[in-house]
Each structure stands twice: as structure tokens, then as C-alpha cells.
Amino acid sequence: MSIRRLGAFVLVLFVALSTSCLTHLSRAKQSYAEGQDAARAFKTERAVASWKKALDEAVRECRRRPSAQSFTIKGLAEANLGRWREAEGSFLTAFSLGFDEGESWASDSALAGLAASFENLDLEAPALRIYAQLVDKSDFKPALMLAAEKRTNLILARAAGLDADEKDRTLAALSKALDRLLDRDFACGLYHYLHAQVDGHLGDIRRAYEEAVMARELGLPSEKIGRDNDNELVYCYIRLIDSLPPPERDALTAAQARWAAKWGWRDDRTPAWKKE
Amino acid sequence: MAKKDIEAALARGVELLDKFLPLKSWLFFPVLYAACVWAVRRVFDYRERILAWQVWLDPDFVRTKPDEFILDFFAGDERLRREYADEMARGDLRVLRAAFPALYSVMGLEDAFLKALFKAELDAADYRAIVVEFAARTARARDAIGPAAADPAFWGILERIGREAASLGVHLLKDDEVQDMIVALIKGPAGLGPSIPPEA
């Protein structure tokens, strides 16, 4: 009888512990997904809160039952929180537990962390080299998006001090690099936003407008970038209207009116978030 | 959920926090807003998150805008067009570019916290003061929370406000609505007389 009771107790304990372990992993996954949703909706603080929660749950799961999956979720949450060094460690462990891509994700996380450190120390040249390498070779999207954004901003800042010819060459090369990124992932709103920025510098207002529209449709990683994209879009739209012959101008005005209605803008040049 | 109940809870929060953040009413914005966000999410490192609040930092892209975009920004805003008429007339991009990061963040991107932080200047149409004060005041806002944060009672009160707001359904409101509510409770920073150098 006592052996039966002991067996039942062990079984209950096993089920309870298994459920508890599964709960941490599923909670981590759920919180991570919530973070991604919040980030897409420009709720940056809520996104960070969800990733932080995902990290806490993943850490518990890693302690109780280490697996490639739990360390991968941990690494993803860390990467989204900008904790690149910790992410590197998590992905390496995930790799050792059977996650094949863990090794390259770890390497990309290490590079992203190193570049960010260089940039914090105002060492822009080595930071730029690392970002360029990530843009060319990385398949790990959080590191790739960070590198694309940072590299574009650093090059645009540098271009301001160049003579006209050199500036045009530099910006044309940057535009081609962004084209290559779009070839790889056309659905990434951030790449379209970055392209619009570069097109604006190159004076290609039509392309800048089209890229800004696509960026808005596909979504951007933060509210401030989203608002800046809206401002860029309106700026290009107004300049295009002034420069186009009447038939094309009418077509553009009609198209912009449709977009504005879809986005809930007050009119064709006033985003909903504008209060003044 | 009654919006008025949440408003009243946040107003009580301002009253309670007043003894911890005297004469620094702009700090109520990030603190109360963070309390609302984090209480709903029930995050463990509530304190760390509130202290790490950096909503006012200007993103890199603000500093890399082309001259035409900057000129259009000043020309497109009636208030700035009036204030910077001389610089625009003589094409003084040096001054306009220097003023752009502060004014674009506050007025172009309409960051709710920055608008609260510079409410007095915006009300007084003193846009050059925003440019002069921008770096120092945003840094002060970041640092000034330190002494209050050292007091455990501050966190107790903040947690209570967050919980009350959460129980009243603050998460059902849009972010903008919560931000506007808090900004409306802020009376404007006191004792912030800026000195304006001629080049601002």
C-alpha cells in the first residue's frame, strides 16, 4: 500500500514539475511574442517589459531544464534588450544543445555588442567596419537591423562633411547596400525607412516618398522612427506635388488621399498623432 | 473603466509624489507613465525600469537630416518661421542646424515627455530657450530622480499608484490618452529661467 502511495506521489510530483517546467517555457515564448507585437504597435516600453518578462521566464526554464529552445528564447530576449554579450553566451549554449544556427547567432551578437561598445567610446571607424560586416553577412535579424540602422546613420553623418562628388559616391554606395538588404528581406519596414532617408539626401524625392509609404505600411521599430517617417513622407509628398505636371499631380494627390484615409490621418498631410 | 477615476488616481499620485520631487513637476510624467505601464505588466525589476526611462533621448537620425528637410521644418511651422525669420532669410544653416535636434524632437516628433518638460517655453513661445536648455534639462531630468529613488517610501507610493491605475483599467486606454492625462496634471516646471545666448 505504502509503495503504491509512494508511486502515486512520485507520479504527481513528476507531472507537477513537468507542468511547471513547461509553463516557464511557454510563458517565455508567450511573453516574447507579446513583446514583438507591442514593438510592431510602437509600444516600446510595453515591448521591453514583455521581453524582460520573457527573459525572466527563460532563465528559470534554463535552470530547471536546459534545452536548445530555452536558451534560444533567452538569447532572443537578450538581443532585443540590447544585451549582446549575454545573448552571445545563450546562443552558444543553445548551439551546444543542438540548435545549429546558435553558433552564427552568437558570433553576430558578439559583433553587435563590440560595435556598440566602440560607438559608445566614440570610436566610429571600427564600429562602422563591424556594422558593415554584419550588414553584408549576418542572417540574424536583430543584429542585422541594428547594424543597418547604425551604419546608415554613421555614413549619413560622415557624408555631411564631404565634398559634393565624394558625398554622391558615398550615398550611392549606401543606397546600393540598402537595395541588397531589400532584396534579402523586402518586408522589413526599417530598410525601406533607411532607404527613404538616403534617397532624401540624394534628392530622389519620388523614390523617398515611395519608400516612406512602404515603410509605413510594413511597420517600423519605434514610435519616434514612425513619426519621423511620416514627416519625411509628407515632406516628399509636398515637394512632389510642387514639381509634377497637372495630370501626374492629380494622380498623386488621389493616391495620397487614399493612403491618408487608410492610415486615419486628418488630411493628406496631417498624421493622426499631430496635435498642433 | 471610468476615465475620470483613472484621472483622479493619477492626480492623487501627483499629490503624493510632490514631497519626493519638489519643484520638479516635469518628472511626474515619466514616473507616473512608467508606473502605469509596469504595474500592468507586473514586471519584477519595476525600479530598474523606471530609473532607466530614456524616452526623451533624440534618436541618431535627427542629426543626419539634409539641409532641405531642416529648412522645410522651420518654414512649415508658423511659430518657428516667425521666430527664425532672419536666419532663414539669410540662409544661416549653421544656426538652424544647431537648433534643429531640440526643436524637431519637441515640436516635430511631438514627444509627450519633452513637450511636458518644455511646457513653459512652448506656452511662452520661447523656442530659442528650448534650444539653449535642451541638453541640460533633459540631463537634469534624468539625474534628478536619483535622490527620490533612494527613499523606499517613494517606490511604495509609486507601486500603489500603478496598482490602482491598473485595477481601474489604465491598460484599456491608448498610450496617447494616458500621456495626455498626465501632461494635463503637470502645472509646468518652476524656477527654470533660461539664459539665452545671442546665437541660439
Image (cartoon, coloured by chain):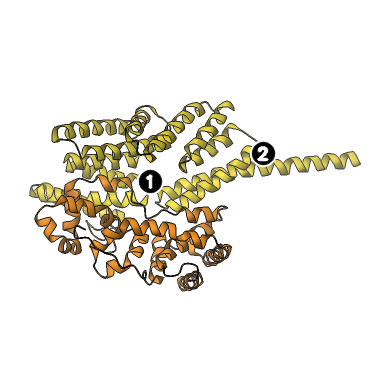
Chain colours: A yellow, B orange
Pinpoint residue A85: horizontal percent, then vertical percent: 49, 35
- What chain letter is assigned to the residue under label 1? A
For label 1, the SS is loop
Q: In this view of the protein, which residue sits in the foreground, B108 or B166?
A: B108
The answer to whether residue B15 shows anywhere in this view is yes
Query: Which badge, 2 or 1, comes first in the chain's sequence?
Result: 2
- Determine which quarter of the picture holds residue A129: top left
Q: In the rendered structure, which amino acid carries the disc numbered 1?
A: Pro
Q: In the rendered structure, which amino acid carries the disc numbered 2?
A: Arg
- What chain letter is assigned to the residue under label 2? A
Asked whether the residues under marks 2 and 1 belong to the same chain, the reply is: yes
Above or below for B190 versus A82: below
Pinpoint residue A123: horizontal percent, then vertical percent: 35, 35
The answer to whether residue A237 shows anywhere in this view is no
Q: How many labels does the image show?
A: 2
Tell me the residue that label 2 is attached to: A64
Q: In this view of the protein, which residue sits in the foreground, A273 or B14?
A: B14
Seen as rendered, the residue at the extreme right is: A1
Above or below for A77 versus B50: above
Tell me the residue that label 1 is attached to: A221
